[in-house]
């Protein structure tokens, strides 16, 4: 006999999670969730982790699910603790990452009655989750059904669900018994296969077009997708645009979108307008490509992604193929053939010209944010996973090329700065891969509690770009016109990370010039017996002016 909480719903949930093969449980300590803590920690099959800060726990679990592709479970006590999960839940919702949020609650009769740690928890995440339920306290057939539906929905929708669980006192009772039986729980949902007759109408449009663009957004690494896109790139009427978080690359792809199109005038852009746009994957970082395709709209926009929320990013969506890109392309590639065209070559000529100008400018550039990103991109070892922070960090990252076997992730569902460190540490823990987090100072300081746990691997590394504030607001023309730039947009500060590194037992280095940066990067990747932080201090540099000069230098020849 195993030990269990005496709460029937805790037992039902435990049995269902085990049946579904879910193993990672991220628990934030509390009292009202004691039945869940007792239940999960007495099951040796569960991998239980304790993280105090619920916001950190939410993003840490998101990092786990990002890497495993399976739901991670979040468990918290009642009251405001639950609300701290919301940023991670919103990110999971828009990034298609499965989370199962389990909140302990007071009995219904105490809601709005002045009872401590009691709020309206039912359906609190309804706008950014796929299933929400509040169970009874007795473990009914309806409770078992709701648990099953929540778990299956997390797998099917690849997003967050919420199970709210009221518990009356006493909370700490333990009994010995077998877990209740649970029916089958579906965790695999096959990709949709389209009828050939249906696809032929799109094949005819594709073959009739001499200007086709494939824009690949955020996507998990996929060797099959890489091979399929390589095949499509053999067609001279096809140009493929990607970003590093698309995790595909080829010399015939446009891998640095802003570098290619930033300085093109309207006539040049009009000449590059596609007739058919196929988008694959999720969010795109480049604002320039969004502006280009919204102004110069294609005749057809096809989005290929298994999702219930197909994005009409360019306001001209004409077809959603609701299946995995690999499945769609495995069918579509059998139907299409190359078309004679100079469309791809036009793009590649622009790429080559701008690449030469890019290299020339960087050769003459001194210590700065831009130069730092060049050295980072050149020195990341083979086989690394890189987690990119948001704001200016992910944008700088798009200007450079990387070794093909480096994989890239970023929280681009909501593009917030609030959980980059926590997500990266969760991803590193779950994957076991050597992991580099590249982040900005505001994001790092905001999420410093992301290091407040005991699960950082020794091969986890952080590069912190500390330019003294939210540098992106120096690039945007609007904030400087308000008179509130430094305090309320850029948020200038004088802090560094030395004391935080000491508190969290990180091996710490600081680089304030080019020589220190080169030495620091080499040491960062040579040492693997302790988590490390390299802080690059560029506060003395006008990074906004360097970046403006860079884009000015890559104007078309």
Image: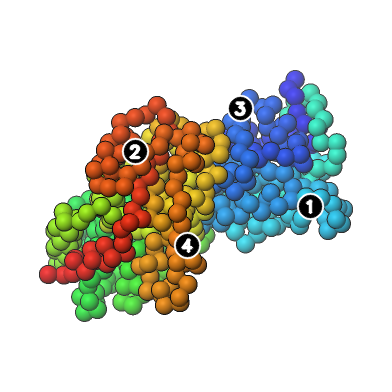
As drawn, the residue found furthest toward the left would be 557
Q: Secondary structure at mark 3?
A: loop
Residue located 40% across and 73% down the image: 480
Left or right placement of residue 28 versus residue 230 in this view:
right
Q: Residues within 10 Å of mark 2 (few under 14, many from 20)?
A: some
The residue labelled by disc 4 is 491
Q: Residue at x 36, y 42 (%)?
A: 510
Disc 1 target residue:
118
Instruction: Tell me if mark 4 has few (under 14), some (14-19) or many (20+) residues whose alpha carbon lies within 10 angstroms of its own.
Output: some
Marks 4 and 3 sit apart, C-alpha to C-alpha, by: 46 Å
CA–CA distance in space, label 1 to label 4: 35 Å
The disc, 2 or 3, on the residue closer to the chain's N-terminal end is 3
| SS at mark 4 in the image | loop
- Could you say which disc has been placed on residue 384 in the image? 2
Q: Nearer the viewer, mark 4 or mark 3?
A: 4
Residue 200: x and y in percent read 33, 63
Q: Position of residue 434 (x, y in %)?
A: 38, 34
């Amino acid at each position: 006999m195993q030990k269990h909480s005496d709460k029937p719903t805790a037992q039902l949930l435990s049995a269902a999670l085990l049946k579904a093969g879910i193993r990672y449980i991220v628990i934030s300590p509390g009292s009202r969730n004691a039945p869940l803590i007792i239940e999960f920690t007495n099951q040796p099959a569960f991998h239980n982790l304790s993280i105090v800060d619920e916001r950190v726990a939410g993003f840490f679990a998101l990092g786990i699910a990002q890497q495993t592709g399976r739901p991670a479970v979040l468990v918290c006590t009642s009251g405001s603790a639950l609300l701290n999960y919301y940023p991670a839940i919103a990110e999971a919702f828009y990034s298609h990452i499965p989370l199962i949020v389990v909140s302990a609650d007071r009995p219904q009769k105490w809601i709005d009655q002045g009872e401590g740690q009691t709020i309206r928890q039912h359906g609190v995440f309804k706008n950014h989750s796929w299933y929400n339920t509040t169970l009874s306290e007795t473990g009914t057939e309806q409770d078992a059904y709701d648990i099953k539906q929540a778990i299956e929905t997390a797998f099917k929708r690849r997003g967050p669900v919420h199970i709210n669980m009221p518990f009356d006192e006493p909370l700490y009772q333990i009994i010995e018994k077998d877990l209740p039986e649970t029916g089958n729980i579906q965790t695999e949902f096959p990709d949709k296969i389209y009828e050939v007759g249906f696809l032929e109408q799109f094949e005819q449009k594709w073959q009739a077009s001499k200007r086709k663009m494939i824009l690949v957004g955020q996507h998990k690494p996929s060797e099959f997708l890489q091979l399929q896109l390589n095949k499509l790139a053999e067609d001279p009427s096809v140009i493929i645009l990607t970003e590093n978080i698309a995790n595909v690359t080829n010399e015939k792809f446009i891998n640095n979108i802003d570098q290619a199109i930033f300085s093109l005038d309207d006539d040049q852009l009009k000449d590059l307008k596609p007739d058919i746009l196929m988008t694959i994957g999720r969010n795109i970082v480049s604002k320039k490509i969004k502006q280009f395709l919204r102004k110069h709209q294609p005749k057809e926009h096809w989005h290929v992604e298994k999702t219930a929320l197909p994005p009409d990013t360019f306001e001209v969506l004409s077809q959603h193929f609701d299946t995995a890109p690999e499945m769609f392309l495995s069918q579509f590639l059998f139907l299409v053939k190359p078309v004679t065209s100079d469309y791809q070559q036009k793009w590649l000529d622009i790429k080559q010209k701008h690449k030469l100008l890019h290299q020339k400018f960087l050769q003459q550039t001194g210590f700065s944010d831009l130069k730092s990103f060049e050295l980072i991109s050149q020195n990341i070892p083979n086989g690394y996973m890189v987690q990119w922070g948001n704001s200016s960090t992910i944008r700088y990252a798009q200007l450079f090329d990387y070794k093909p076997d480096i994989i890239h992730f970023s929280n681009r569902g909501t593009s917030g700065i609030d959980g980059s460190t926590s997500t990266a540490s969760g991803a590193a823990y779950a994957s076991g891969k050597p992991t580099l987090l590249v982040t900005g100072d505001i994001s790092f300081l905001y999420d410093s509690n992301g290091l407040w746990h005991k699960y950082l691997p020794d091969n986890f590394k952080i590069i912190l770009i500390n330019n003294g504030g939210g540098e992106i607001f120096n690039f945007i023309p609007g904030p400087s016109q308000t008179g509130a730039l430094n305090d309320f947009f850029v948020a200038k500060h004088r802090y560094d990370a030395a004391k935080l590194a000491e508190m969290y037992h990180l091996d710490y280095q600081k680089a304030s010039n080019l020589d220190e940066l080169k030495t620091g990067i080499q040491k960062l990747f040579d040492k693997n017996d302790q988590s490390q932080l390299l802080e690059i201090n560029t506060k003395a540099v006008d990074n906004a002016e360097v970046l403006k000069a860079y884009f000015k230098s890559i104007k078309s020849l």
